[in-house]
């Protein structure tokens, strides 16, 4: 397409030169120049549109955000999806970030949910990079109290998070 545009532009310059040489109508040169400018704008419109979308981190053309949300919600183990963002960072490079709510489960099960969501997004929508924040249903991120399952026996232990304790000790509390 680019080479065709160059050929048409070159032919237009030759035609304008011939018209000016034989008729003296110097208006032919600016008319052809304007037509070449319009041809360049027309042929570059797609690239310009894509570039603006990338710079504004807009939703990729043809991407249905509702379908993305439905696909994530359909994954076994996902209760809800919120703060969903899909954007383009370059030609063909689509990214996604979201928060998913899951039921209380083992870390391994949560990792399986993440892998499934990531694979579905890549396969169905071409999303190459995902960042997913997992939130446990019933345990709000800002609450200082939650219920955690102890690995191995499935028993539940209530504990409070003390902001003065190191993070690695908070799970071992028994109340």
Image (tube, helix red, strand yellow):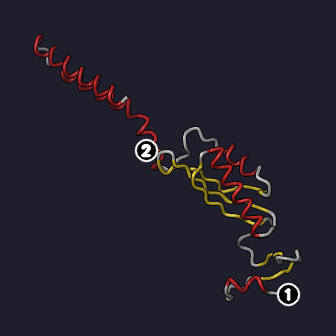
Disc 1 is placed on an element classified as loop
Going by the picture, which residue comes out furthest to the top? 23
Report the residue at 15% width, 19% height from top: 17
Disc 2: which residue: 51
* 40 lies above or below 125: above
Disc 1: which residue: 175
Disc 2 is placed on an element classified as helix
The disc label shown at residue 89, or none:
none
Count of residue discs: 2
Asked if the residues shown at circle 1 and circle 2 are in contact, with their CB atoms under 8 angstroms apart, the answer is no
Tell me if mark 1 has few (under 14), some (14-19) or many (20+) residues whose alpha carbon lies within 10 angstroms of its own.
few
Give the mark nearest the N terminus, 1 or 2.
2
Position of residue 157 measured from the top left corner of the image (x, y, whole percent): 85, 80
Of 51 and 10, nearer the camera is 10
Query: Could you say which quadrant of the image residue 163 lies in?
Result: bottom right
Q: Quadrant of the N terminus?
A: top left
- In the displayed structure, does residue 9 sit left or right of residue 97? left
Position of residue 26 measured from the top left corner of the image (x, y, whole percent): 14, 18
- In the displayed structure, does residue 141 sit left or right of residue 63? right
Report the residue at 41% width, 34% height from top: 45
Of 146 and 115, nearer the camera is 115
């Amino acid at each position: 397409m680019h080479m065709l545009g160059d050929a048409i532009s070159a032919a237009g310059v030759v035609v304008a030169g011939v018209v000016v040489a034989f008729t003296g109508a110097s208006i032919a040169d600016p008319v052809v120049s304007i037509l070449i400018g319009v041809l360049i704008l027309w042929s570059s419109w797609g690239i310009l549109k894509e570039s603006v979308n990338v710079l504004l981190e807009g939703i990729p053309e043809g991407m249905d955000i509702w379908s993305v949300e439905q696909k994530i919600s359909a994954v076994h183990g996902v209760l809800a999806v919120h703060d969903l963002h899909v954007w383009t960072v370059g030609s063909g490079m689509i990214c996604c970030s979201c928060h998913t709510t899951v039921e209380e489960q083992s870390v391994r099960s949560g990792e399986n949910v993440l892998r499934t969501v990531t694979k579905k997004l890549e396969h169905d929508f071409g999303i190459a990079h995902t960042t997913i924040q997992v939130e446990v249903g019933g345990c709000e991120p800002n609450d200082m109290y939650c219920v955690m399952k102890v690995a191995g026996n499935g028993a539940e232990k209530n504990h409070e998070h003390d902001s003065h304790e190191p993070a690695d000790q908070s799970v071992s509390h028994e109340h």
